[in-house]
Image (cartoon, helix red, strand yellow):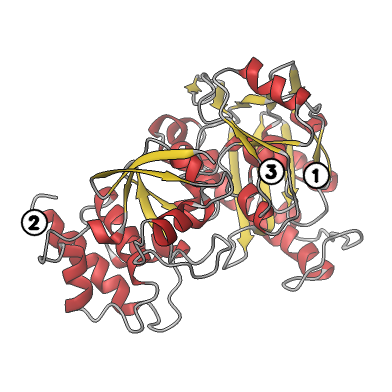
């Protein structure tokens, strides 16, 4: 079996995988980083979103071997120790989650939206979130959280 | 998903060699359609040949009369290119509404057209603009490229390298998208080159096609009202859980009308 090496949340890892192993399987089952979820497994729901070389991707739709040498960021690498990232704090403040299943993907998507649109508004967040499904909240508080998180990141200098 | 051998060739020649020698090979571009297809075991290749490291496929070249896009350029890159937005906003807009932001970060032009999904967006742009497909062997006019449902004119060892899109006077793409997959239930690309008008329809039939009666009507009068009395036949149109042939036929007319309106306002 091939061995793939990549950086995950700042740490170098080398893992033996099958060619058919998905990135999300490597993260969850081999590295035990279970904050990244598998919702639909059909590239629609966005619960599995992680950043690969700074870009959000659906880790259920990437082979682990395609991520060789990449820099991967999962929800576990977002906070600074015990201090929540401003985007995570915004979800907490704005009640941006109920069951929490979609939340890690929502936060990872939100971080990228904030990067591209520092002064983002509700309409832009709704449009950009079309690849992340929540089955609890009706999205209102998620949108509010991402707008607040983006503004907080902007004030903190990114 | 069945396991397979995985290759990451460093040149177009090496990639083509794998296509010639492997038992049942499949090329991978962005993988956004292919990986779901493998998961469902709709395909079970012996070898997956990843084009990620083949040089020269991630390019973009915008000239006054032509926009050239490399096969491995992602939808997100096309959508966010200021040069494409300025020269051919209809193309940037089309790319920016494929799938969702995560899918657009991986999905590519070459993968989309080589797969020729009947509900894909890019084929409408190629047909609507009369594009030219460059491959590892030759050039193919878009009108000759998409041959049938999930079928193209590509030979077994032929690889798409780039597409040249002529820049029209006016153009726009409008789609009625499925709210979960964002595929086109129906999408219509309208482009006007002087007196020549092209109208390409995706999502409605088994393969992207040109709607001749629309092109004639819009050539006479490039306005939404030129389509007002037109009847689109539902014969041969797709049917699925979401839309039947009659509904799709009506959507063709509605999307075309909206595309003409948008084209007259500057495209998108």
Residue at 7%, 55% in the rendered image: A156
Viewer-proximal residue among B4 and B84? B4
Q: Chain of mark 1?
A: B
Q: CA distance from mark 1 to mark 3?
A: 8 Å
Q: CA distance from mark 3 to mark 2?
A: 43 Å
Q: Position of residue A63 (x, y in %)?
A: 52, 47
Q: Badge 3 local density, few (<14 within 10 Å), some, or many (20+)?
A: many
Q: CA distance from mark 1 to mark 2?
A: 50 Å
Residue at 16%, 78% in the rendered image: A93
Can residue A77 be seen here? The reply is yes
Viewer-proximal residue among A36 and A145? A36
Residue corresponding to mark 1? B209
Q: Badge 1 local density, few (<14 within 10 Å), some, or many (20+)?
A: many
Q: Give the quadrant of residue B158.
A: top right
Q: Badge 2 local density, few (<14 within 10 Å), some, or many (20+)?
A: few
Q: Is residue A66 left or right of residue B139?
A: left
Q: Give the quadrant of residue A154.
A: bottom left
Q: Is residue A141 above or below residue A146?
A: below
Residue corresponding to mark 3? B124
Residue at disc 2, secondary structure: helix
Q: Position of residue B254 (x, y in %)?
A: 69, 61
Mark 3 or 2: the one toward you? 2
Q: Position of residue A59 (x, y in %)?
A: 46, 54
Residue at 35%, 40% in the rendered image: A6
Residue corresponding to mark 2? A155
Q: Chain of mark 3?
A: B
């Amino acid at each position: 079996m091939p061995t793939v090496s990549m950086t995950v949340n700042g740490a170098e890892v080398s893992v033996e995988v099958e060619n058919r192993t998905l990135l999300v399987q490597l993260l969850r089952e081999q590295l035990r980083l279970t904050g990244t979820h598998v919702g639909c497994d059909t590239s629609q729901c966005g619960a599995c979103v992680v950043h690969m070389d700074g870009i959000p991707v659906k880790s259920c739709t990437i082979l682990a071997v395609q991520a060789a040498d990449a820099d991967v960021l999962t929800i576990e690498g977002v906070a600074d120790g015990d201090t929540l990232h401003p985007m995570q704090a915004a979800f907490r403040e704005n009640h941006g989650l109920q069951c929490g299943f979609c939340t890690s993907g929502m936060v990872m998507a939100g971080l990228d939206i904030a990067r591209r649109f520092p002064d983002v508004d509700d309409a832009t967040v709704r449009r950009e979130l079309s690849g992340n499904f929540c089955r609890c909240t009706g999205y209102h508080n998620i949108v509010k959280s991402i707008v607040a998180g983006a503004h907080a990141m902007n004030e903190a200098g990114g | 998903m069945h396991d397979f051998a995985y290759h990451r060739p460093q040149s177009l020649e090496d990639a083509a060699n794998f296509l010639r020698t492997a038992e049942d090979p499949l090329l991978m571009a962005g993988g956004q359609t292919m990986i779901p297809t493998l998961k469902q075991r709709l395909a079970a290749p012996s070898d997956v040949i990843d084009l990620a490291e083949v040089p020269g496929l991630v390019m973009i070249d915008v000239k006054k009369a032509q926009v050239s896009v490399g096969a491995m350029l992602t939808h997100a890159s096309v959508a966010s290119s200021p040069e494409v937005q300025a020269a051919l906003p209809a193309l940037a807009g089309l790319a920016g509404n494929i799938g969702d932001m995560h899918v657009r970060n991986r999905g590519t032009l070459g993968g989309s057209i080589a797969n020729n999904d009947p509900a894909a967006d890019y084929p409408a742009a190629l047909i609507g603009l009369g594009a030219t497909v460059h491959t590892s062997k030759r050039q193919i006019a878009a009108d000759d490229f998409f041959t049938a449902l999930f079928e193209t004119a590509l030979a077994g060892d032929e690889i798409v390298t780039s597409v040249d899109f002529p820049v029209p006077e006016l153009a726009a793409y409008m789609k009625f998208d499925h709210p979960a997959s964002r595929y086109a239930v129906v999408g219509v690309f309208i482009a006007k080159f002087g007196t020549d008008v092209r109208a390409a329809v995706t999502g409605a039939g088994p393969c992207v096609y040109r709607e001749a009666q629309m092109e004639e009507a819009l050539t006479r009068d490039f306005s939404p009202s030129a389509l007002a009395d037109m009847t689109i036949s539902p014969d041969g149109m797709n049917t699925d859980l979401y839309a039947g042939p009659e509904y799709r036929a009506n959507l063709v007319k509605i999307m075309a009308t909206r595309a003409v309106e948008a084209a007259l306002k500057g495209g998108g």
